[in-house]
Amino acid sequence: MRILITGAAGFLGSHLCDKLLADGHEVIGMDNFITGNAQNLAHLAGNEKFSFYRHDVSNYIFVSGKVDAVMHFASPASPNPQSAAGYFNLPIQTMKAGALGTHNCLGLARANNARFILASTSEIYGDPEVHPQAETYTGNVDPVGLRAVYDEAKRFAESLTMAYHRYHKVDTRIVRIFNTYGPRMDLEDGRALPNLLKQALLGQPLTVYGDGGQTRSFCYVDDLVDGIVKLLYSDEHMPVNIGNPVEMSILQFAESINKITANKGGITYVDARSSRDPQRRRPDITRAKEIIKWEPAVNLEEGLRRTIPYFKEKLGLA
């Protein structure tokens, strides 16, 4: 296939480019570098099956030639309020990527009779009152909260995707992505894993908010990309969770990182954050197992060992 990937210079987008090129497809990358990193695609220079458009997806998208699939992964995603690339500081751009960007990508898919896949998120569930989160759960969300620019943009994008599928018969798919980590992720992302792993490698005490009882589940990027591609190849149109169902508390996670990195800095506790961070997060991946025969294969210890060299390089510790 000839596949367009928006957000191609991002963490997930760049890994998707690698996987689909390895599968023998032709890949067109698209990014405006508002949060993406050109270094994530530098290794593809000279690859005859890869081409690149620098473009903002909230504007009309033109790609010369036939396109067989459109994968919409363009959006700020970092919850770090101190990051210039986070959605707290790019609220309008985030909502435009989810609304106008999704509309433009769906229009391109429709014009080419191409399959379409939307990168949605576990954040559409909000701070869940149902655990674990299955695709049938409609969420506990705050449409005017600080996180809403990202959460609601993705919820709207899902609604628009299903409208195009039902009304225009576009061949759509929706992947709900849970916490993912690995090489090329932004060290200033603001999520638990990059925050804690960076502190550990620098020999610092790990910052845990509150008592550390809030939970997360972490999926290694290779597993996630494998699930996304299997969904792309499938005929499933309703949302599918892709993530690792192994849940642990942030305190347990911090202790694991200190052990793996041999960090002697210990743990420091600070007041809990008040930005409506979800207290529990774990995907129900029953549909992924049944429909696309997918489940993660890389455990946390192995995934961290694969990720640490990249973090060391970026921190100047390599």
Image (cartoon, helix red, strand yellow):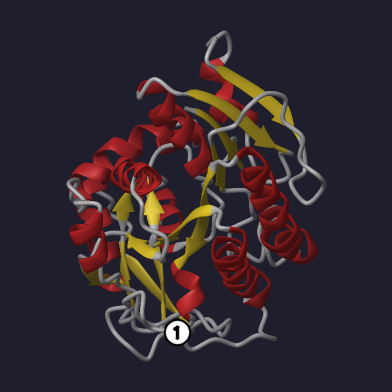
Check disc 1 and give the amino acid type: Thr
The quadrant where residue 318 appears: top left
Describe residue 125's horizontal placement relative to residue 303 as left or right.
Answer: right
Q: Is residue 121 left or right of residue 105?
A: left
Q: Does residue 163 lie above or below 72 as drawn? A: below
Question: x and y percent of residue 166 in the render?
Answer: 55, 67
Residue at 48% x, 30% y: name it. Answer: 17
Q: Quadrant of residue 5?
A: top right
Inspect this view and state whether residue 226 appears. Answer: yes
Which residue is the extreme one toward the right?
A: 59
Residue 204 location, x and y as percent?
Answer: 41, 55
Q: Position of residue 193 (x, y in %)?
A: 39, 57
Secondary structure state at the residue bearing disc 1:
loop
Q: In the shown orientation, is residue 21 left or right of residue 50?
A: left
Quadrant of the rendered image containing residue 222: top left
190 or 17: nearer the eye?
17
Q: Position of residue 273 (x, y in %)?
A: 53, 81
Q: Which residue is mark 1?
A: 138
